[in-house]
Amino acid sequence: MPTARRSVPCLVPLMAALTALLCAVTYLLGGFPTGRAKAVPDTDTPADAPLVEDESAPPIRCVVIDAGHGGEDGGASSASGVVEKEINLAVALALRDLFEAAGIPVVMTRTEDVLLYDRNVDFKGRKKVLDLAARRLVAERTAEAAAKDGGTSLFISIHMNAFPQPQYSGMQVWYGTDAAASQEIAFAIQTASAALMPDNHRKIKAAGSNLYLLDRIKTPAVLVECGFLSNPEEALRLSDPRYRHALAVLIFSAAVPYVTP
Ligand SMILES: [Zn+2]
C-alpha cells in the first residue's frame, strides 16, 4: 500500500483531479465495454510491493510528457493496422491539455509524428539511439530548470503494449527507481486504471536497463503501457478517441495530486 504523502496537495490540482474524475464517471456511464485482463506470468510483481517515501525529495513543479515512438518508428501495431505511435501522441496531447488546464507547466518530447534524432549528424543505423538520447535531454533540461527553484519534474512516458499471444490486455505502469515518488505515482495510476479496466489485475513494475529512459532519468518517472494492441478487443477500444481521452483523464487524475505548481 502507498504511504502517506509528505504534504497536502494544493487546491488547484485537487479540483482538477475531481473534475477529471467526474469526466471519467461520465465516460463510464456511457457504457464502454471493458477488457478482460489475464496476467502475463513474467510481468507481474507482488501486490504489496513496499513504497518508500523520500522526505528530502524536492516538490514536483512541472511535467514532461513523452509520446513514445514517432515518424519512421511506429512502435507496436494491431492486426487491424492501429499503430502505437499515433495512440501514444493522442493520449499524450490530451494529457498535456489536462495538466495545463490545472495550471501545471508541461514540456512535450514531441507534438508531431516525428522521431527526434538530429538530421545534421550521421544518423544511419542510430536513429533510435539518437531519438532516445534527445528525449532524455528534454527531461534533463526540464529537471535542471525546475531545480533552480528548488523543485523537480515528473516524466510520464506513454506507450502501448503488444504480446505474441492475443489474449493479454490491460494497463501496466513501470517506474524509475532513482526517485521514490516514481513508485508511488505508478501505483496511483495503476490503481486508477481499475475505473476503466476492472478486470485488469496487473501490478506496477520497476524499470531495469531495458527501459532506457526510466533507467537513466533521475527525477520521478513512470512509463504507462496503456493497453495491448495485440488484443483485438483492446485495439478496437484504443482506436476510439473517447477511450484515448479517458486514458489521459485517469493518468492525470492519479498523478496530479503529486504535483505542486
Ligand atoms: Zn512503445
Image (cartoon, rainbow, N blue to C red):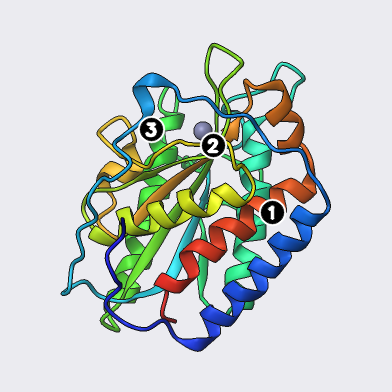
Please name the amino acid that badge 1 sits on. Answer: Ala
Rendered location of residue 106, percent (x, y): 52, 68
Rendered location of residue 189, percent (x, y): 47, 54
Which residue is label 2 attached to?
200
**Cα separation between marks 1 and 2:** 16 Å
- The answer to whether mark 3 is within 8 Å of ligand 1 is no
**Element under disc 3:** helix
Q: Earlier in the sequence, mark 1 or mark 3?
A: 3
**Cα separation between marks 1 and 3:** 31 Å
* Residue 246, numbered label: 1
**Element under disc 1:** helix
* Label 1 Cα crowd, 10 Å radius (few <14 / some 14-19 / many 20+): many
Quarter of the image for the C terminus: give it.
bottom left
Please name the amino acid that badge 2 sits on. Answer: Asn
Q: Is residue 200 visible?
A: yes
Quarter of the image for the N terminus: give it.
bottom left
Rendered location of residue 26, percent (x, y): 78, 62
Q: Residue at x 78, y 47 (%)?
A: 241
85 or 180, nearer to the observer: 180
Taking the image as shown, residue 11 lies to the left or right of residue 235, namely left
Please name the amino acid that badge 3 sits on. Answer: Val
Q: Is residue 97 above or below residue 139?
A: below
* Label 3 Cα crowd, 10 Å radius (few <14 / some 14-19 / many 20+): few
Q: Residue at x 60, y 17 (%)?
A: 167
Which residue is label 3 attached to?
129
Q: Earlier in the sequence, mark 1 or mark 2?
A: 2
